């Protein structure tokens, strides 16, 4: 989708925006490299993935999902991708999942099966419509100057 490629390009070129969007220091961006990852043998693709440049199981990798349309499989699909990656790469790796929606209306309706997971610090949901308006002449997220 075009939205996916827009977010991918944004986070590829300005990785500090992603970490500041999460309330993390922008300096975290220097410790990661961002790419779209295909998990072999399963033909599933992560929308975005931040891997540590220097691997460290104690520091999280970030799975990023850009969800611009309504789907009732967002979280099951994301959990599948996370599980497959951890199984193939390192099941001891710390991780975080971030789902970015344009607005709340796009989020899947039935959150009940994921209610506990969605409250954990490992899961972050961001609604672009809820982000504060940026001052004139800035990028758009107040965090990314």
Image (cartoon, grey):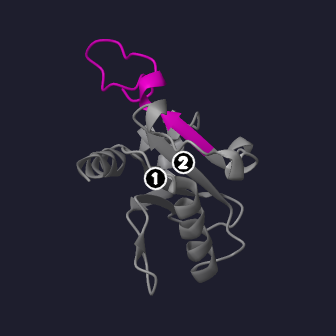
Say whether residue 135 is magenta.
yes
Q: Is residue 38 above or below residue 132?
A: below
Residue depicted at x 60% and y 63%? 79
**Of residues 96 and 100, the one drawn nearer to the viewer in this rendering:** 100
Find residue 68 and report its horizontal and vertical position in percent. 36, 44
> What secondary structure is the magenta-colored segment mainly?
loop
* Neighbours of disc 1 within 10 Å: few (<14), some (14-19), many (20+): many
Question: Which range of residues does the magenta coloring cover?
Answer: 124-145
Find residue 132 and report its horizontal and vertical position in percent. 45, 18
Residue depicted at x 50% and y 40%? 107
Q: Earlier in the sequence, mark 2 or mark 1?
A: 1
Find residue 89 and report its horizontal and vertical position in percent. 58, 79
Residue depicted at x 72% and y 61%? 58
Q: Which mark is residue 98?
A: 2
**Of residues 37 and 119, the one drawn nearer to the viewer in this rendering:** 119
Residue at the spot of label 1: 65
Quadrant of residue 90 in the image? bottom right
Q: Which mark is residue 132?
A: none
CB within 8 Å, label 2 to label 1:
yes
The reply, left or right, for residue 33 in relation to residue 118 is left
Find residue 86 and report its horizontal and vertical position in percent. 62, 74
The residue sitting at the right extreme is 116
Query: Distance of mark 2 from mark 1, alpha carbons?
Result: 6 Å
The residue sitting at the bottom extreme is 41
* Neighbours of disc 2 within 10 Å: few (<14), some (14-19), many (20+): many
**What quarter of the picture does the C terminus occupy?**
top left
Say whether residue 21 is magenta.
no
The residue sitting at the top extreme is 136
Secondary structure beneath label 2: strand
Secondary structure beneath label 1: strand
Quadrant of residue 106 in the image? top left
């Amino acid at each position: 989708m075009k939205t996916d490629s827009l977010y991918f390009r944004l986070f590829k070129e300005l990785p500090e925006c992603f970490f500041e969007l999460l309330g993390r220091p922008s300096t975290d961006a220097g410790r990661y490299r961002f790419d779209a990852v295909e998990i072999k043998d399963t033909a599933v693709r992560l929308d975005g993935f931040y891997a540590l440049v220097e691997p460290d199981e104690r520091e999280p990798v970030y799975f990023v999902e850009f969800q611009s349309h309504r789907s009732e499989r967002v979280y099951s699909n994301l959990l599948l991708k996370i599980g497959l990656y951890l199984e193939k790469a390192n099941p001891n790796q710390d991780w975080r999942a971030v789902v970015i929606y344009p607005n709340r209306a796009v989020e899947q309706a039935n959150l009940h099966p994921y209610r506990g997971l969605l409250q954990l610090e490992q899961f972050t949901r961001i609604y672009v419509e809820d982000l504060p308006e940026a001052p004139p002449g800035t990028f758009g997220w107040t965090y990314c100057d």
